[in-house]
Amino acid sequence: DTAVSQTPKYLVTQMGNDKSIKCEQNLGHDTMYWYKQDSKKFLKIMFSYNNKELIINETVPNRFSPKSPDKAHLNLHINSLELGDSAVYFCASSLGQGYYEQYFGPGTRLTVT
Amino acid sequence: AQTVTQSQPEMSVQEAETVTLSCTYDTSESDYYLFWYKQPPSRQMILVIRQEAYKQQNATENRFSVNFQKAAKSFSLKISDSQLGDAAMYFCAYNTDKLIFGTGTRLQVFP
């Protein structure tokens, strides 16, 4: 019954490694997002996809690459991890932009050592 | 660029009392949407209430209501009859094509 799911929930890895976070939504939404929440709880959008097409790409390092194989999935791949990438990453989805409520996944806590 | 400011990093309230969380924003747009999200210790983000900028009437959801002042660009959240389960981080957010969040207010509820 989970609306927006993310795997894994926790990820501990070393600097320089490459890792992926997967997101799936079963709500039939067209729009999906990735957010980063830093250690001070500040939430900032990274990417947004609408019907598998990238529509928002904030100033995020090229080491971060989102991929949407279909409307229900949006994955985030991170290359050459750095200490500063440690954060909680949230996936979200919505029916559309603007008015629509965004449904958030449980978050993935990434720790880079 | 749009910005959202929450000037109260922490607030506290006694159970059953009322508390108001402040939020101001800056935008040159006339059509936009405002939200309050709650993040309890479980870290799940939960929508509390939303407001369309073109509506003058303040939104209400049970014990939660907003005071939306468009000219002043202010969007405060009032929680009535506070409950222990209301303890959480509260984020104000502005949306046209993307959600822009404030820095959050941590609300503590004391029995």
Image (cartoon, coloured by chain):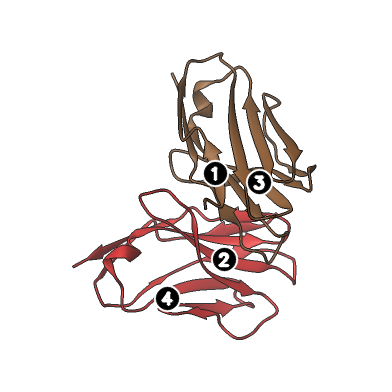
Chain colours: A brown, B red
Can you tell which mark lies on residue A33?
3
Q: Image point 31% across, 78% down: which residue? A: B81
Can you tell which mark lies on residue B35? 2
Callout 1 environment at 10 Å: few (<14), some (14 to 19), or many (20+)? many
- Residue B50, quarter of the rendered image: bottom right
- What x and y, as percent, mark residue A64? 66, 28
Callout 2 amino acid? Phe
Work out whether residue A66 or residue A73 is closer to the camera in this orientation and state it. A73
A31 left or right of B7 in image: right
Seen from the viewer's position, the closer of residues B87 and A68 is A68
Per the model, the C-alpha gap separating discs 1 and 3 is 13 Å
Lower sequence index among marks 4 and 2? 2
- Report the quarter where the C terminus of chain B lies: bottom left
Task: Tell me residue B110's x, y (percent).
Answer: 21, 65
Residue identifier under label 1: A5
- Amino acid type of the residue that numbered disc 3 sits on in the rendered structure: Tyr
Residue B12 is left or right of residue A97, and the answer is: left
| Secondary element at image label 4 | strand
